[in-house]
Structure formats: structure tokens, C-alpha cells
Amino acid sequence: MAKCRSEWLTVRPTVRVPSPIWGIPVYAKARLRLRGLEPEATYRVRDLDKGELGEMTGRELTDEGVPAEISDRPGSALMVYERKG
């Protein structure tokens, strides 16, 4: 049985779009930096709406993050990652 653990995401914004409702900035594009990954391991990353994003190392996912873009308003993004091997 697989163990499940929580992961924290850090969002590094690249574009801010003003919210018409509350005036709070929302992010149209961001890089989601993961934590707690093995730096030398390879991970497969998928956006369940847009398809395969490719393979990245744990170090890349931690340092650079996963690019995320939500073009629909309102909208959401669902991404999954899994360790290879």
C-alpha cells in the first residue's frame, strides 16, 4: 500500500491580473515549486487538462518549479507528478 504525504507548494507569480470582484490580484501564470522531492530522481509531470508537461528532476521541480497557466475565468488547473522508477 502506498504512503500518502502532504506537499506544500510555493507560487512564484509571473503575471498579475486584477480581480474584478475583490480587487485582489490573481495569477494568470505561475511557477509552482515543490518541496520534499529527491533532487536526483526523475519525475513525470502532467497537466490533466492540457496533457503531458514532460519529465523533470526533483532539483528542477524544487528550484524552478512547474509552469502553470489558467486561461479561463473562472478557471482551475489540476496537475499531477509521479516519480519514475
Image (spheres, rainbow, N blue to C red):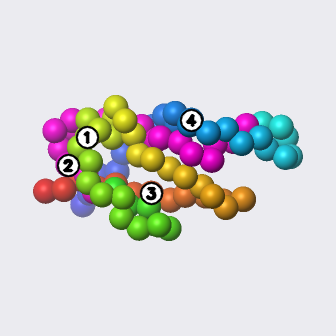
Mark 4 crowd level (few <14, some 14–19, many ≥20, 10 Å Cα): some
The residue shown at (62%, 39%) is: 15
Task: Name the amino acid, label 1.
Answer: Gly
Callouts 2 and 1 close, C-beta under 8 Å: yes
SS for tag 1?
helix
Magenta-highlighted residues:
25-44
Quadrant location of the C terminus in the rendered image: bottom left
Disc on res. 58: 1
Question: Residue 62 colored magenta?
Answer: no
Which residue in the structure is indicated by mark 4?
Answer: 13
Disc on res. 79: 3
The residue shown at (60%, 55%) is: 70
Mark 1 vs 4, N-terminal side = 4
Task: Name the amino acid, label 4.
Answer: Pro
Q: Nearer the viewer, residue 2 or 76?
A: 76
> Looking at the image, how many numbered discs can be counted on the residues?
4
Can residue 85 be seen? yes
Quadrant location of the N terminus in the rendered image: bottom left
Mark 4 vs 2, N-terminal side = 4
Task: Name the amino acid, label 3.
Answer: Met
Q: Label 1, label 4: how many angstroms apart (C-alpha)?
A: 20 Å
Q: Label 2, label 1: how many angstroms apart (C-alpha)?
A: 6 Å
Residue 51 place in picture, x, y as percent: 41, 67
SS for tag 2?
strand
Q: Label 4, label 2: how many angstroms apart (C-alpha)?
A: 25 Å
The residue shown at (44%, 61%) is: 47
Mark 3 crowd level (few <14, some 14–19, many ≥20, 10 Å Cα): some
